[in-house]
Structure formats: structure tokens, C-alpha cells
Image (tube, rainbow, N blue to C red):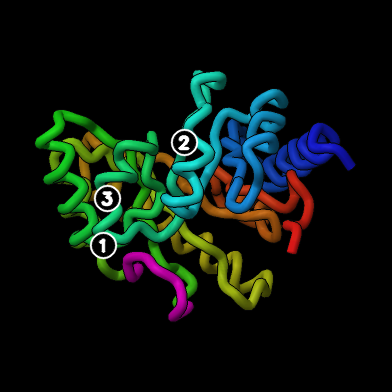
Amino acid sequence: MSLEERLLKTKSNIRTALKEAGRQGPIEIVAATKTRSFDTIIRAYSCGITSIGENRIQEAEKKFLSFSTMPKIKRRFIGHLQTNKVNKCLDMFDTIDSLDSTKLATKISNRIIKTNQQIECLMEVNTSGDKNKKGFAPDKINEMLECTALENINIVGLMTLGPGSQKEQETRKSFSLLKNIKETLNNKIGNQQISTLSMGMSNDFTIAIEEGSTMVRLGTVLFGPRES
């Protein structure tokens, strides 16, 4: 199956999930391109995908040398960001979708204040409770609020990963919790409302949409299995 066919099928599944939830879109598709070739990114862009997500700074650095041919593409960092990689990440990416601590947020803010930049971010929340996952604990509302108040960091939403068990009930609970956290934060933030909910990957994106996702990160469902 070609990328074009996979994308059409994915969009059909998204429409079905929206209908099931009684919602309307849009749903932003972020193509997760870790380990994928630059040619794959070009094909995705030619199919109308304008957001890509990369997990690793070193890998992305090699790919991004030729992005002048794709002026509308948005480069999203979706992996765990180590504090010693902040400067390089800010030089390469348009967004950081995995802000997972006040320490990291403060380092980003201090750096971009010096360079007069601004960066769009999503805060990652560990709603599944999986010990191997990063992110704010769901009850750390005050810490998340501290991040929204930092200079030059534009917090536009939240991100989470579904539970490793992949059980539907646990997955729904994890995604529903993120939506509730968004509402709790918005009640406290005031005018700086956050709207993006980035949740759902190839194995659970329809469930995520039914639970309120506005952005899905898709790899295998678009590109097929990774080569071993």
C-alpha cells in the first residue's frame, strides 16, 4: 500500500472517530519520522502533511539540512529532551512537544530570553502512570502553571502517551485524564487558554480522537513497519 493510500485510509478513520464522538475537526496529523529517510519526509510533504515529529536531535540534524525545499513544514520535537541539548533543539525545531519538567522549561526560557526568541510548547503529562514514561505527574498542576508563566515559552497544549498495556479501557482513562487536566489548567490560567491535546499514535489514535485529541502522531500507520 502506498503512502497516499495509507493517508486516505487514515483520514477516513479520523472522520469516523470524530463522528463517533460527535465532534468536528480539524485533527492535525504529525508524521512521526524517526528512523525514516529524508525521501520519506519529502513524499509525506507532497501528500499534504506539513508537520513532522522527530525524537532524536542527532538524527534530525542530518535530515534538516535540506528543508529549504519544504518551506511550509513544521518541525516538532516529540522525544525526551535532555537539558544539555536545549540549545541545539531550539536552533532546529519550531516546537517542543515534550516539555516534561519545570527545570527543562526554565532552561529553555532562560536561553531564548537571551536570543530574543519564542518557542511553542506542549507539556507532557504521564497520565498512564507507566514508570518508564516521562512527563509531569497528573497532580502537579502548580508546576504546570509555573511553566505557563515563563517568558517567551508559549504553552499551547498538552501531550501524553497511551499506556503500555494498550488495553482500551486503560487507554481511554489515560486520554480522558489529559482532557480533564487541560480543563483544570484553563480554569486557573485565565486568558492564556490552552487548546491542543496531542494524544494518539498508530495503535490508538481513533480512541484518542474519541476522547478529545486534536493532534495525532502517526508513523507505522502512514509508512508501514520500520525496517529492522
- Are the residues flagged by discs 1 and 3 in contact, CB closer than 8 Å? no
Q: Determine if residue 181 is in view.
A: no
**Where, by quadrant of the figure, is residue 195 drawn?**
top left
Q: CA distance from mark 3 to mark 2?
A: 15 Å
Q: Residue 133 at what x, y percent from top left?
A: 45, 72
Q: Residues within 10 Å of mark 1 (few under 14, many from 20)?
A: some
Tell me the amino acid under the disc marked 3.
Val
Determine whether 155 is above or below 83 in the image. above
Task: Find numbered disc 2 in the image and state the secondary structure of the residue it sits on.
Answer: strand
The residue furthest right is 1
Horizontal relation, residue 73 to residue 190: left or right: right
Tell me the amino acid under the disc marked 1.
Ser
Q: Residue 110 at what x, y percent from top left?
A: 12, 45
Q: CA distance from mark 2 to mark 1?
A: 21 Å
Front-lying residue, 166 or 218: 218
Front-lying residue, 77 or 177: 77
Q: Residues within 10 Å of mark 2 (few under 14, many from 20)?
A: many
**Where, by quadrant of the figure, is residue 19 drawn?**
top right
Numbered disc in front, either 2 or 1: 2
Residue indicated by mark 3: 86
Q: Residue 84 at what x, y percent from top left?
A: 25, 58
- What is the number of the mark on residue 75? 2
Extent of the magenta region: 130-138
Q: CA distance from mark 1 to mark 3?
A: 13 Å
